Image (cartoon, helix red, strand yellow):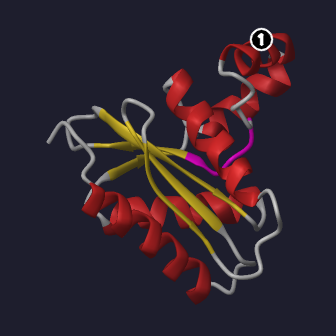
């Protein structure tokens, strides 16, 4: 598999929200991009705040742009803030360096896309993203 299908992207988004409901997370927005950065799925639960989808996009797009999960971007932001500021500029402002942006990989480690989740704590957002990816039979990479 070299492409992330619409069916897999939808499975990821739905499963992420299912996990959030099972764990009583706050309302979430979930975004799925394919490897080329094309938006494949976006779901926002009732009750999410106004800009949650855009924050989820920044988590996912930032991870995809730099090829690492956003947990690693968070560490970079703490260790090298000028680099992350420059990378955010290079990514057109679409880089949110906190957990919740997770790479989607196949069994051989190839990046197929990314998921971004926003609405609860960053750690809980990441849990939901990882669960969605696993539900689709793929491998997640949080950048940990």
Is the residue marked by circle 1 packed among few (<14), some (14-19), or many (20+) residues within 10 Å? few
Q: Does the magenta stretch include residue 99?
A: yes
Residue at image coords 33%, 50%: 139
Task: Look at 22% across and 40% down and name the residue there.
Answer: 3
Report the label total: 1
Pick whichever, 106 or 112, lies toward us.
112
Residue 72 coordinates in the image, percent (x, y): 64, 32
State the residue at coordinates (76%, 68%).
120
In this picture, residue 59 sits left or right of residue 78? left
The chief SS type of the magenta part is loop
Does residue 25 sit above or below 141 in this rendering? below
In the displayed structure, 44 sits above or below 19; it is: above
Residue 15 lies in what quarter of the image? bottom left
Residue 132 locus on image (x, y percent): 43, 65
Q: In this view, does 44 lie to the left or right of 17?
A: right
Q: Where is residue 53 in the image (x, y as percent from the top left)?
A: 68, 56
State yes or no: residue 82 in magenta.
Answer: no
Q: Nearer the viewer, residue 64 or 23?
A: 64
Taking 140 as reference, is 138 left or right?
A: left
Relative to 13, is 110 above or below? Answer: above
Q: Which of 53 and 79 is in front in this view?
A: 53
Q: Position of residue 105 (x, y in %)?
A: 33, 42
Q: Determine which quarter of the picture holds residue 76.
A: top right
Q: Which residue lies furthest to the left in this view?
A: 1
Query: Which residue was labeled with disc 1?
Result: 86
Badge 1 element: helix
Query: Quarter of the image containing the N terminus?
Result: top left
The part of the chain drawn in magenta is 97-101
> To which quarter of the image does residue 33 belong?
top left
Q: Quadrant of the C terminus?
A: top right
């Amino acid at each position: 598999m070299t492409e992330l299908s619409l069916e897999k992207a939808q499975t990821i988004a739905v499963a992420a929200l299912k996990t959030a409901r099972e764990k009583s997370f706050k309302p979430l927005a979930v975004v799925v991009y394919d490897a080329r950065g094309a938006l494949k799925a976006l779901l926002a639960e009732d009750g999410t705040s106004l800009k949650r989808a855009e924050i989820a996009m920044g988590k996912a797009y930032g991870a995809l742009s730099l090829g690492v999960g956003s947990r690693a971007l968070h560490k970079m932001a703490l260790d090298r803030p000028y680099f992350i500021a420059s990378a955010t500029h290079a990514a057109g402002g679409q880089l949110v360096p906190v957990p919740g942006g997770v790479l989607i990989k196949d069994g051989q480690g190839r990046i197929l896309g990314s998921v971004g989740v926003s609405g609860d704590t960053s750690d809980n957002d990441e849990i939901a993203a990882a669960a969605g990816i696993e539900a689709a039979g793929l491998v997640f990479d949080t950048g940990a």
